[in-house]
Image (cartoon, helix red, strand yellow):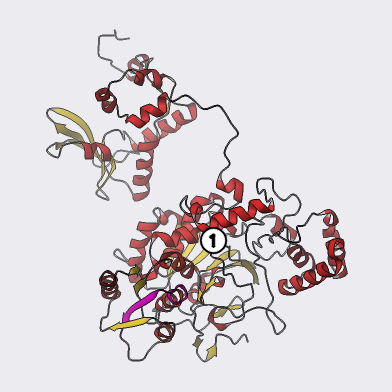
Amino acid sequence: MTKPNESPVSVADLKRRANPENPRTIASARLSALKDSIVEFGDLGGFVLNVRSGLLCGGHQRGEAMPEEATIEIERRYDPPTEPAGTVAEGSVILRGERFKYREVDWPKKKERLAMLAANQHGGEWTDGLKTLVEGLDERDRLLAGFMQDDIASLLAPSPPPGPPNPTLRERFGVPPFSVLDARQGYWQERKRAWLALGIQSEVGRGNNLIGRSPQELFCHFTGTPYGKARKIVAEAMKAQGEAFDLAALIKAHGGRGADLKGLGALAVNKEAAEPGLNYYRRTNKEAARSAPAGLGGMFKPIAKLPSGPDSEAAIGPGGVKATSEIVTDPSALTPVETVEVPGGTVFLKRDDLFSFAGAWGAKARALIKLLAGQKGCTTAGNSRSPMVSRVARAAQALGVIARCHCAKSKHMTDQVADAKAHGAIVIEHKVAYLTALIAKAKKDAAAHGFKFIPLGVECREYIEVNAAQFANLPPAAKRYVITVGSGMALASLLAAFKLWPELRRPVVGVVVGGAQSIGKRGRVVALLDQWASGWRDECKLEVVDSEFDQPEKQFHQFGTALDPHYEAKAALYVRAGDCFVIVACRSTPFAVGGKEANDRS
């Protein structure tokens, strides 16, 4: 054992010299994690450069604070790299004779990200001793120690008296808005007031009423009656019986399953105001119904399964076909999940193509509402066969916004360009071959007119903000998710949803329809996913279809619905039993492939 004035010769000596005034402590679980981190990453306390990516993993703030004249001196190299820390070189950053630790490593991207997190997380917790240490600091010493004035004021402020814990948005209202900013939006505030006025307490739960509060929803579930017809039957019974309305008797009179009605007669139903609970997916048995995520029912507008066929009350849906589920027009409501029986099991269909705004279908239409609100005008660019120009034109016309759409000049006007013009868009055609040139022209046009530029594929933060929450009702029974990858924004939104609801995480298959070039080293899809969905390589596998985007899939009528022949119809070929197929959107115009009309259900 060394004496106090002697240099330590081992870590054991250092541990014996722990300063009792240190205001930082660490719990045993965190200490164990820190030990594992030191073994895996080595010392992250200095500058750490990953030579594989050419980027810093540690020392960002030190680098910002240090004068640029400081130099780097490599003192030792390792070939092969050390295991498992992956060090390839060690040295120092030298500033005025002082040496600061510098290390080079060779890490894959995933390890680089983990190291950055570890460098910022393994710090332990402050103890009560911190207050004692900072109380006597003058301003210079305070700043040297890294404490701003606000930090000091917070530390020295008296502790408030303990009160009841504040519930989170998720605890109070089931599904939180995607961000705190969304919580201030008018539609969220209006919905919040409506819930509270109804006395809805999502934290209390619904007891045995797992399928919702609405009598129409209960009638639909227990009798198997189509929702449109169930709504009519229940409304007539409620009008005729008044306060004597007996839901259990009505269900029995229409062949309801007696074993499932136990306790239903005593169920309190708000006949005037209660909204129906959310149909997570078509319930094929009681176990499926029970497996829906808790706490989300009673929040959204009714979305229920409707049958197809000549007697159906369904409305006209995407591509001109009759929709098998109710069309959703509220951008804050969840679109339904249906089930289809296939050889070997069940396929779940997340029907985001059933969201409609001004006849534009799907996730991009929902994002356009937010992007165009309050705008004088907008510009965009797109492939003349892509529904991008059509969607923007429809949404802009509905919101009273001028739309200027840029696309490549073609020999014959496509249905998408014709639809954009029919909905008031000014279409500017250019003799260019590349989308990048069109995008540049659309951006320049937006700047010249003071208009909002709508990125190709609606590639922006707002898209993810409004669409990630749509995945709250993904079926727990799904084994994989299959999703079309055009721009990649829908996939990025799905991966963002995993951060909101980690329990939904499953393997993801992204089916790329833009050709192999879009996922090459400089491909647009890869660049977009790197920007909006960091870590996507660990979450999903990309498959590339073997046809060009402009070549439609002839077998577009699959899973009982018409799929967009340029997008989802191609991805459907990768779906197997047990998967949840995310149908992101569908083009607004009726389409025909190989002589078969979209509205031909044969």
Residue 162 x/y as whole percent: 57, 28
At label 1, which amino acid type do we have?
A: Gln
Residue 484 or residue 413, whichever sits in front: 413
Q: Pick the residue in front: 560 or 497.
A: 497
Displayed quadrant of residue 444: bottom left
Horizontally, residue 558 falls left or right of residue 393, namely right
Residue 262 position within the rendered picture, expressed as x and y whole percent measured from the top left: 85, 55
Determine whether, in the image, residue 332 is placed left or right of residue 566: right
Q: How many tags in the picture?
A: 1
Left or right of 188, for residue 259: right
Please tell me whether residue 504 belongs to the stretch shown in magenta: no
Residue at label 1? 470
Image vertical order of residue 199 relative to residue 141, above or below:
below
Instruction: Identify the residue at image location x=69%, y=48%.
Output: 205
- Going 39% across and 31% down the picture, which residue do you hit? 123
Viewer can see residue 266: yes
Residues in magenta, as a range:
396-409
Q: Secondary structure at mark 1?
A: helix
Left or right position of 1 against 499: left
Pick the quarter of the image with the N terminus.
top left
Q: Is residue 59 visible?
A: no
Residue 69, x across and y down, in percent: 11, 38
Above/below status of 22 relative to 501: above
Which image quarter is the C terminus in? bottom right
Within 10 angstroms of label 1, few (less than 14), some, or many (20 or more) residues?
A: many
Identify the image quadrant of residue 217.
Answer: bottom right
